[in-house]
Image (cartoon, grey):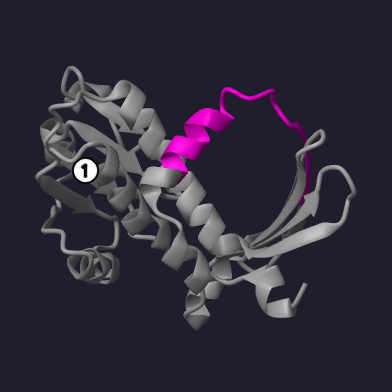
Amino acid sequence: MSTESFHLDADQIYKHINFAGLINALALMHREPPADLRDLLLEQQGETEKNYCLIRAAWQKGSGLGVKIASVFPDNKAIDLPAIHAAYVLFDGKTGVPTRSIDGTALTYLKTAADSALGSRLLSREDSETLLMIGAGPIASALVDAHLHVRPNLKRILLWNRTEARLKGICQRLHDLGYKVEIITDLNAGVAQADVISSATASCNSLIFGEYVRPGCHVDL
C-alpha cells in the first residue's frame, strides 16, 4: 500500500466524510457488541498548566484494532497553535496488519460532533428552532453543523463565549458554511431562549443553570 493511500489527512477526511453518513454509522455501532477499551493517561506539569497525553486503544475482535494518541498542551494558545493534536492508527482485526493512519484531530472533531448530534436526534424535539452554542473552540463549528443535520428546523444560532473576541473565528467559519449566527453576551438569556444547547468548553465553573433552561430543551455537554 502506498504512503498516499495509507494516510488520510484532514483535507481528505473533511472531503469524503459527511455528517449524515457518520451519524447513521455511529447509531449502528452503538448497537454492536462493545469493543475492549483501555486508556493510558500521562501528565506533565508545565510552567503554568498541566500538559496531557491520552492513549486509547479499542479492539473489536475480528473487526478492527485502533489506537488514538491525543496531546493536550493548553499553553499552545500563547503561540497561536491548537491546544489539542491527535493521531489515529487502525489495524486489521484478524491479522494485526496496520491498514490506515488517520489525522486524529479531524477525526475527533467529526466523531464528537456526530455523537452529540446523534444524541439530539434521539432526545431533542423535532420542532426545535433555536440552537445555543457555548464555546468558540475549533470543535464548535463542527457541532453546529452536525446539530443542523439532524434538526434542520433550527433557524437561529446563538453563540456565547467567555472571551467574545474569540467568537470572530467561529462566526467566520459558520458564515462560510452559509449559516446566520448571532453573538450574545447574556448567557442566561440565551439559555432561556434555546431549544438545543451545546456546550464545548474547558471551563471548571458552572455555565448552564437549570432555572433558565426551558421545558423540553435538550442540553448537550
First to last magenta residue range: 22-41
On screen, residue 211 versus residue 208, left or right, reads left
Query: Can the viewer see residue 221 in this picture?
Result: no
Query: Considering only vertical position in the picture, is 192 above or below 7?
Result: above
Front residue of this view, candidates 172 and 4: 4
Identified at 41% across, 38% down, the residue is 116
> For mark 1, what is the residue?
132
Identified at 81% across, 36% down, the residue is 62
Is residue 31 part of the magenta span, yes or no? Answer: yes
On screen, residue 133 versus residue 194, left or right, reads right
Query: Can the viewer see residue 98 in this picture?
Result: yes
Identified at 20% across, 19% down, the residue is 216
**Residue 75 locus on image (x, y percent):** 56, 70
- The mark total stands at 1
Farthest residue, direction bottom: 79
**Residue 88 locus on image (x, y percent):** 69, 59
Farthest residue, direction front: 1
Is residue 136 part of the magenta span, yes or no? Answer: no
**Residue 70 locus on image (x, y percent):** 67, 58
Front residue of this view, candidates 187 and 62: 62
Identified at 72% across, 62% down, the residue is 100
Secondary structure, mark 1, is strand
Mark 1 surroundings: few (<14), some (14-19) or many (≥20) residues within 10 A: many
Quadrant, the C terminus = top left
Farthest residue, direction top: 215
On screen, residue 144 versus residue 3, left or right, reads left
Front residue of this view, candidates 29 and 162: 29
The three-letter code of the residue at mark 1 reads Leu
Quadrant, the N terminus = bottom right
